[in-house]
Amino acid sequence: MDDLRDKYIDLIANAADEAALEDLRVQAIGKKGEISLQMRELGRMTPEERQVAGPKLNALKDEIASALAAKKEALGDAALDERLRHEWLDVTLPTRPRREGTIHPISQVTEEVTAIFADMGFKVAEGPQIESDWFNFDALNIPGHHPARAEMDTFYTHRSEGDDRPPHVLRTHTSPVQIRAMQDQGAPIRIIAPGRVYRADYDMTHTPMFHQVEGLAIDKDISMANLKWVLEEFVKAFFEVDDVELRFRASHFPFTEPSAEVDIRCSWEGGTLKVGQGDDWLEVLGSGMVHPKVLEAGNIDPNAWQGFAFGLGIDRIAMLKYGIPDLRAFFDSDLRWLRHYGFSALDVPTLRGGLSS
Ligand code: PHE
């Protein structure tokens, strides 16, 4: 019994970890452990022998059990000490500089445009980017054979075989939101609709996805004069200048009659754009008086109501205002570009608080 005792006390003292300790427990005092087997022998002894051996074996078993427990605790403490040695944290160290995210120029300019038009009573309206060809074309007086459909480089969705319905399109402009807003709200109406539009085109100034903002104002007596005033106010506020000169050029859009493209007087002296003075003209938007057929498609009576609409390229005016040369960089997600051209998330553009600063 003394040999057994010495053997196990020694093995327990040298156990490397809890798994080894558990093995020893099984070997010594488990069901078929050496000490347990000895205890079974008690039955075969004479009562006198048993009286001596019994208490001794029990004492041995207790001693081994408490040696195991003590060692287990010691191993646990050691493991904890080891973890604490590695997992320390010096809370007195200075914090790392925070990488601040920035607002993308497109988001910034969309907010600026929205703030300016909101000040003139325009609400924001929205429509889907995957649009039916009726909303994108027919309702806007662009029937099936119309050349404007081909000119727009439209992305069409796929219809499964045997499905003869016209395919949906990725909207080629924000103008379908005019129809949706008219149908939803009726007249009078005053909305802008900023959002993504799609055309299959790609170079320095074209990307297959870009952004427009649509404007629509309908009432009993809205005229081109209102359109001109609204656009002047917008351009002054947006480019943050006191005076601007707009030039209306006769143009053609199927959904407006008459139609006008609008240019802003500007100069490019020294390569930088100055809005409001100079001998150059910047083409910024398409506009006109809403065509009677478009009002009808929006369930508005063209004999009672009239109004203007315009469409403006958000990316284009963002490039102009913030001197961004290549449109494609807008969508490259290059962090260096974003940090350079991005805006602070905490400066929400407002007319009173300044748009861009
Ligand atoms: N939808 C036209 C375009 O994308 C712009 C436009 C909108 C013109 C509203 C007139 C009126 O080019």
Image (cartoon, rainbow, N blue to C red):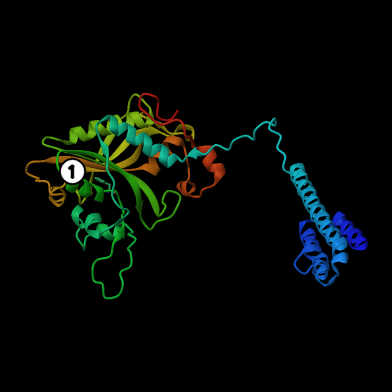
Q: Is residue 294 left or right of residue 90?
A: left
Front residue of 231/136: it is: 136
For the N terminus, the quadrant is bottom right
Please tell me how crowded label 1 is: few (under 14), some (14-19), or many (20+) other residues with Cα within 10 Å. Answer: some
180 in relation to 165, above or below:
above
Residue at figure coordinates x 33%, y 36% from the top left: 114
Which element is circle 1 on? helix
Instruction: Judge left or right: residue 182 versus residue 29.
Output: left
Q: Residue 235 at x, y = what percent? A: 32, 32
User: Quadrant of the image for the C terminus?
Assistant: top left
Q: Position of residue 55 (x, y in %)?
A: 84, 58
In terms of depth relative to the viewer, which is nearer, 295 or 97?
97
Percent of width and height locating residue 300: 12, 46
Q: Residue furthest bottom?
A: 162
Task: List x then y, in percent, for residue 223.
Answer: 15, 35
Residue under circle 1?
Answer: 185
Q: Residue at x 85, y 70 (%)?
A: 45
Q: Is residue 329 left or right of residue 265?
A: right
**Displayed quadrant of residue 188:** top left
Instruction: Name the amino acid type tagged 1.
Output: Gln
- 249 or 288, nearer to the observer: 288
Question: Which residue: 80% across, 60% down?
Answer: 20
Farthest residue, direction left = 303
Location of residue 310 by image quarter = top left
* Quarter assignment of residue 121: top left
Residue 16 in sight here: no
Query: Which of the two residues, 3 or 301, is positioned nearer the viewer here?
Result: 3
Q: Is residue 208 above or below residue 288?
A: below
